[in-house]
Image (cartoon, helix red, strand yellow):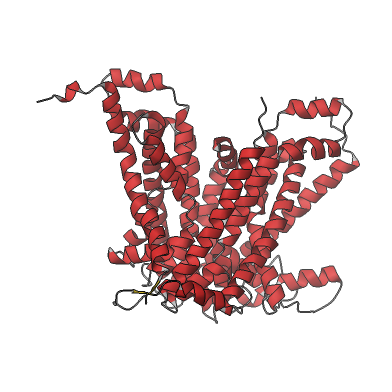
Amino acid sequence: MKRMKRLNLADIAILACLVGVCIVVLIPLAFMFTSSTMPAIDILKLPYPWFSDHFHWQNFWNGIKGPEGTFIFLRNILNSLIVALAVTCSTVVLSALTGYGLAKFEFKGRTVVFMLIMATMMIPFEAIMIPLYMVVTRMGLQDSYAGLIVPFLTSAFGIFLMRQFLMTFPNEVLDAARIDGASEPRIFASIVLPNAKPAIATLAVLTFRSQWDSLLWPLLVIQSEEMKTIPLYITKFMAETHSDEGIMMAIAVMASIPMFIMFLTMSEYFINREGLHSSTKG
Amino acid sequence: MRQRRGFSMEQRKARWGWIFVTPSLLFFFVFSFYPIFNSFYLSFFRKNLLSLKPPTFIGLDNYKYLMRSSLFWQSVKNTAVFTVGAFLPLLVLSLILAAFIMTRPRFRKGFQMLLYSPAALSSVVAALIWLLIFDPRGIANQALNALMNTSGVNYHWLSSPGMLRLSTIIVYVWKYVGYFTVIFVAGIGAIPGSLHEAALIDGADRWTDFWHITFPLLKPTTLLVSVMAMIQCLKTFSTQYLFVTSGAMSQPIEVITLNIYNTAIKDYSIGRASAMSVLLFLVMLTFTWVQLRLSRTEEVSYM
């Protein structure tokens, strides 16, 4: 049996510090979960009753139903899911395709293409949102799923990630498949994609999260209640002065469920992706 | 006529290479390059979002207007205060936390996950939670009262300009400190253990080891984190937008992105909004350029 290593004073101080910071970081989360099950009156009681004796589940039901009983919340959460999933699928496929093309094919202009794509990473979305909005309006895509999805069909960061990942993929495997007569699209779909799973998972998690979080772009292109995504729904709720705090927090919890599921089941892709990121830079 | 078979393997591969990169390339021309050129172009014109009239060329008037506009300078100042105020604590805290986490290998993953968990929330939800925490009757006042040994004092988290700025910074640091800690942990983890062993054999204690081995070797990571954090802070929008939407005063926290949004969507002045976008773009480009320059000279190799 391993002997317990004796902790010295410095170790204890460090551990106490870490635990302390973690507790402080988790307090707002605990506040969200506890207050979502309280009647509004209890939430702003002094002092805050961390452990309430009864579970006020009505917050969740009222949140889903909405003040007018239209269940628009469900429609809005569906919108968010549709947009986030569509963007994630398209970004993964297009980034993998382009990253593969840049990593494994030699053609005239390859370096220029790569540089052009990398250059777009320096253009912040905030600096182009107005012209982008005008482009999308001219295409007649405002207030539609297409308007939310089309400007994010692929990502320069994703292409970079896939290219770096696929550069180390053995050429022999690809050539063997070619000799066997497999077509290039076939090789991509049945050999490259399945072997790029770690990079794909990282990119998928990242893309889904940024779409689920997206506020500025939907704010520009969406006008109707039916087309709103969850961030817009919450924004509208917050702007109303007489919103019930308990219901608000119940909505916050429900809006976070997909992210929490993803975070708990795929945490290694959240945590490891910076490792991947820093190992692929340069 | 030449048969398809006549193409060599190289030519065929080159063609497929182009086929694979073309969709993304076309996309970037329409949704990145065209808009950024259009941003520059429109910044020299007067254009109303709602009017169908073609834009009128007015030269540098939009830029001149901005230079004289106190609202513009206020939003520049707000962005600068927020960026410095959020970036420094983020950098220092995440570095310290990462160094602490590395001393406890058994709990490494657990601590990282706990610290990272706020980043899994969307910024809208984060703002919603903190607005209730900063409520005059909320737990922020309760905690500060307990800490300062006062009772029932309202610290005006959302109603005094300074505190309001601090509040937005707290939300941001809370949300992203775990994210940057994870990057630092990866950076520290990449330093070969043999270097630490050598230092320890030479009689260094843990503090000397950190200060003379880990910290200098961490320079590229620190640089990466600094620029990433700074660029992220410059682009901040959601927290400020939601705070203002739910009734906080806008003057101390109207950052540049919020100003661009309001100018374009509320005032319909596309030209002025574009001029601001261009300035924001140039500032960020400078930061990125500095990062690239520095990282080239500071690259650490463990060969």
Depth check: give the residue in front, A172 or A266. Answer: A172
**Residue B246 against residue B297 in the figure, above or below:** below
Residue at image position (34%, 77%) is B50
Instruction: Quadrant for the N terminus of chain A, please.
Output: top right
Percent position of residue A237, x then y: 50, 74
Depth check: give the residue in front, B187 or B38. Answer: B38
Percent position of residue A50, x then y: 71, 66
Percent position of residue A80, x then y: 42, 59
Q: Quadrant of residue B111?
A: top right
Q: Residue furthest bottom?
A: A242
Residue at image position (84%, 32%) is A4
Query: Left of A224 or right of it: where is A241?
Result: right
Q: Quadrant of residue A75?
A: bottom left
**Residue B278 against residue A243 in the figure, above or below:** above
Percent position of residue B33, x then y: 38, 54
Depth check: give the residue in front, B287 or A270. Answer: B287
Query: Left of B113 or right of it: where is B52?
Result: left
Does the rendering let one see residue A95? yes
Q: Residue furthest left?
A: B1
Residue at image position (48%, 65%) is B277
Does the rendering let one see residue A55? no
**Total tally of numbered discs in the picture:** 0
**Residue A127 against residue B24 in the figure, above or below:** below
Q: Quadrant of residue A9?
A: top right
Instruction: Quadrant for the C terminus of chain A, please.
Output: top right
**Residue B15 against residue A15 in the figure, above or below:** above
